[in-house]
Image (cartoon, rainbow, N blue to C red):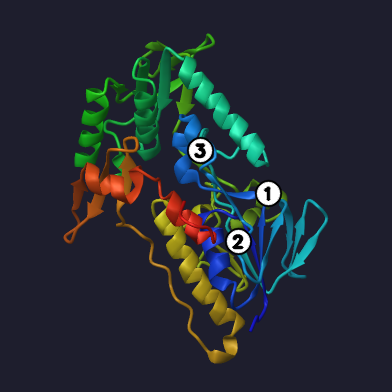
Amino acid sequence: MHDGDVVVIGGGYAGVRLARRLDGTARVTLVDRKEVFFHRIASLRAGVRPEWSVTPFIPYDRLLRHGRVAVGKAVRIDTAERQVALATGERLPYDVLVIATGADYPEPARFTGTTTEDAMKAFAGHQQKIAGADHVLVVGGGPSGVELSAEIRLARPDARVTLAHSGASLLHATGSERAGRRALAWLESHGVDVRLDSFMSPGNDFGTYRDAHGDVIRADTSFWATGTTPNTLWLRLAGHGDWLNPAGHIKVDRTLRIGGHRDVFAVGDVNDASELKITPAALAQADLAAWNIRAHLHSRHRKEPRLYRPVRRTPIIVPFGPADGLTVLPVPGGDSAVLGGRPSVLAKAKTLMTPYMRRQLGYTAS
């Protein structure tokens, strides 16, 4: 039995998970501007190694058995009429709307363009720049910056690789000083020049970069792994700026609803839930929102909504290429253990969770 129309805007990790969870109980329409799912976890390696270029792209065609995927861009939400307008002119009625538009990432973790061909050309461009560079600069010492630096070093053992980080230690957001020290030791032992307390900005000349101390670095190419921006500009342009906090995230209550709208939810990187913006958190939000949406659609059964508890302590895995890495594992008492290569390789580093995501979209693991 399919009871109600659910429109999910955004086909990233949270949107895909939620759409699949509701496919058997509602008429689901998943809207995304891309023609395929973009497995962002595999994108850093794809931006470095040509043999990984195709890996991040998984078709949507097996995701939903009963619902459908609409390729297009949402441009307007009419909450009075309960309709979503697409740039194509199509209007989608909804009983429940979910905004899961995620965040914009720096390249190479960005889906450039609108087609697989566009994104693969972007990957090829990054690969060629890295292959021909004598010096590659990576800015940002969080998980993405550390992972990308390791990938570049392993692909180009003959090149100079510099990682510049504005903070005093790497991987600060993990809450583990030990993890930062281990990442630093791995990078330095593999010849990466790590510069801490080094806030970088483009220099006056092409190919130059200047830190806060006035020191100039010359590099053939650079990558900035310095944070993300929620994909909510379209909401502001559509007249829903009051839904956003100063950082651009959608304000949600503990049921993951937008205030004043019982039939509008926001999940994943796009909302203001206070936690690390990582894939396990997006999936947890999608699962809870799916429960609350079923309760809303089947209100005659008087199911109480569940309240979301931000994921503050979850394993964080940072690959150092396909054969090494570290895992920050929370343990009772508020501390964290840092595991080394083997568990990190098995859990993520070797395959970058590609088999898992392929199964989530209805494909075989390979």
Q: Nearer the viewer, mark 2 or mark 3?
A: 2
Earlier in the chain: of badge 3 and badge 1, it is: 1
Cα–Cα span, label 2 and label 1 = 17 Å
Q: Is residue 168 left or right of residue 243?
A: left
In the picture of the structure, the residue carrying the numbered disc 1 is 33
Query: Which of the numbered marks, if any, corresponds to residue 67?
Result: none
At 63% from the left and 72% from the top, the residue drawn is 263
Earlier in the chain: of badge 2 and badge 3, it is: 2
Number of marks: 3
Q: Position of residue 217 (x, y in %)?
A: 40, 12
Cα–Cα span, label 3 and label 1 = 17 Å
Residue density around tag 2, few if under 14, some if 14–19, many if 20 or more, within 10 Å = some
Q: Nearer the viewer, mark 2 or mark 1?
A: 2
Which residue is farthest right? 89
At 62% from the left and 69% from the top, the residue drawn is 65
At 48% from the left and 59% from the top, the residue drawn is 359
Q: Is residue 196 above or below residue 99?
A: above
Q: Is residue 345 above or below residue 225?
A: below
The amino acid at mark 2 is Arg
Q: Position of residue 185 (x, y in %)?
A: 21, 29
Query: Which of the numbered marks, if any, corresponds to residue 109?
Result: 3
At 52% from the left and 63% from the top, the residue drawn is 17
Q: Position of residue 215 (x, y in %)?
A: 37, 11
In the picture of the structure, the residue carrying the numbered disc 2 is 62
